Each structure stands twice: as C-alpha cells, then as structure tokens.
Amino acid sequence: MRDDHGHDLTSEPTENELRVLREAAGHVAFAPGFADRVMARRAATRAAGDSSTDSSTDALQYVFVRLAPLAAAAVLVLSTVNLMNASGRGQPILDRLFGLPTVTLASAYTLDGALTSWGETNR
C-alpha cells in the first residue's frame, strides 16, 4: 500500500529515507531571542494599559463563574436522586450515589460469560 507521494506504508522507513526527509524539511526554529522579544512586547502592552491580551482569561473566568455553581447543583441533585431511588440492601453508599447495580453472584457469572463469548467472537 502506498500513499499519495509514493511512500510504502506497509514497512518501516529506512535510515536513508528518514535522512532524506529530515534534509528536505530543513532547520525549523524561531530566530534567536524570540522569547525575549515576545515577553518585552507583552510587558509593554501591559504597561500601556492595554488589556486586550487578557480577554481570553476574562472570558474563561466569566463562563466558569456562571457554570461552576450550576454543575455543582446538578451533581448534588443527581446524587440525591440516586440515593432516593436505590435500595439500600447491603449496598455501599458510594455505589448508591453513582447508581451502580448491586453485585451478586449471578451478575458476576453473567459478566464472565459475556467476556468469554466476546473473546471468542473477535478472533
């Protein structure tokens, strides 16, 4: 099998092929002092009072402040519903909170049978 450029996709590339690809890509890097220039420009915009660089931070904070209490309330409501609807016969409270079914010997054998048959059909 070959890709659009004629490369063989069924085998590993040889050292020679990798060397040719590396040479064709060339040296990719930022010019020296790039990080210093970026940080100096960022400091200058902050000193000038331009807050446009922090707009993404403000947007994330705006969304989080409004959604976090709603998510916490939803967790509490769903946990309460799970506790109220689950029977407490020998089931730990965490299992009831998460709505997990009660583990019995029959359910364990059912799971074992399902896993065994799955392994046989996918060979």
Image (cartoon, helix red, strand yellow):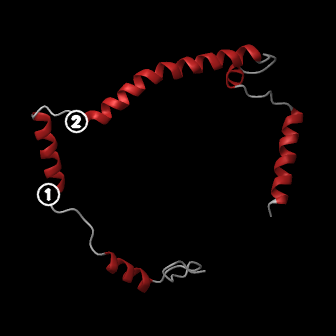
| Residue 35 in the figure: left or right of residue 15 | left
Q: Position of residue 7 (x, y in %)?
A: 51, 81
- Mark 2 packing: few (<14 Cα in 10 Å), some, or many (20+)? few
Disc 2 on helix, strand or loop?
helix
Q: As rendered, which of 35 and 87 lies closer to the eye?
A: 35
Q: As rendered, which of 13 and 46 lies closer to the eye?
A: 46
Q: Residue at x 47, y 83 (%)?
A: 14
Q: Position of residue 63 (x, y in %)?
A: 41, 27
> Can you name the residue that lies furthest to the bottom here?
16
Image quadrant where one finds the C terminus: bottom right
Vertical placement of 91 versus 52: above or below?
above
Q: Quadrant of residue 8?
A: bottom right
| Residue 44 in the figure: left or right of residue 30 | left
Quickly name the residue at label 1.
Answer: 33
Query: Amino acid type of disc 2?
Result: Ser
Q: Position of residue 2 (x, y in %)?
A: 56, 81
Mark 2 vs mark 1: in front: 2
| Residue 103 in the figure: left or right of residue 62 | right
Disc 1 on helix, strand or loop?
loop
- All told, the count of numbered labels is 2
Q: Earlier in the sequence, mark 2 or mark 1?
A: 1
Measured Cα–Cα span from mark 2 to mark 1? 24 Å
Quickly name the residue at label 2.
Answer: 52
